[in-house]
Image (cartoon, rainbow, N blue to C red):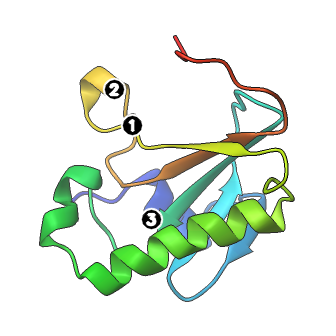
């Protein structure tokens, strides 16, 4: 698999505004935020998208989901709520071929998103 921007952020080669990290995941602010709070969470275990989840270790996936929840809590989003989005593939506008969750919050979010 080709190296991505997220591989370089995880390696510390590209600076990012990190808001949470542990042994399993890294969370950082999106450079083009779509809400007052817009954070990306990436697992340290590499995969292209959520479509590859069936081939992954369920424990690693569980740790990734826990990191998403811990990040939202660290950002103070639990009370008001937040949205978690996975873009998968070109039609969903996934721009980096590395699984990542968008956490969006800090305001009332509409549905459908557009």
Residue drawn at the location 81% of the way across and 53% of the way down: 77
Please, what secondary structure does the residue beneath circle 3 have?
Answer: helix
Q: Do the residues bearing badges 1 and 2 touch, measured as CB atoms within 8 Å?
A: yes
Which residue is at the front of the view, 104 or 108? Answer: 108
Q: Do the residues bearing badges 3 and 1 touch, measured as CB atoms within 8 Å?
A: no
Q: Residues within 10 Å of mark 1 (few under 14, many from 20)?
A: some
Q: Do the residues bearing badges 3 and 2 touch, measured as CB atoms within 8 Å?
A: no
Q: CA distance from mark 1 to mark 2?
A: 5 Å
Residue 22 shown left or right of residue 45 in the figure: right
The relative height of residue 8 versus residue 86 in the rendered view (above or below) is below
Would you say residue 72 is visible in this rendering?
Answer: yes
Q: Residues within 10 Å of mark 2 (few under 14, many from 20)?
A: few
Mark drawn on residue 7: 3
The first of marks 3 and 2 along the sequence is 3
Q: Residues within 10 Å of mark 3 (few under 14, many from 20)?
A: some
User: Mark 2 — residue?
Assistant: 92
Mark drawn on residue 64: none
> Residue lying farthest left?
55
Q: Position of residue 29 (x, y in %)?
A: 73, 50
Exactly how many numbered labels are in the figure?
Answer: 3
Please, what secondary structure does the residue beneath circle 1 have?
Answer: loop
User: Mark 1 — residue?
Assistant: 87
The first of marks 3 and 1 along the sequence is 3
Residue 89 shown left or right of residue 111 in the figure: left
Q: CA distance from mark 3 to mark 1?
A: 18 Å
């Amino acid at each position: 698999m080709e190296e991505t921007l997220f591989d370089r952020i995880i390696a510390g080669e590209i600076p990012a505004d990190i808001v949470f990290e542990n042994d399993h995941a890294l969370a950082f602010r999106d450079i083009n935020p779509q809400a007052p709070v817009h954070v990306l969470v990436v697992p340290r275990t590499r995969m292209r998208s959520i479509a590859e989840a069936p081939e992954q270790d369920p424990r690693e996936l569980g740790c990734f989901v826990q990191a998403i929840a811990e990040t939202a809590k660290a950002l103070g989003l639990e009370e008001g709520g937040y949205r978690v989005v996975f873009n998968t593939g070109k039609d969903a506008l996934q721009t980096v071929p590395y699984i990542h969750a968008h956490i969006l919050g800090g305001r009332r979010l509409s549905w459908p998103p557009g």
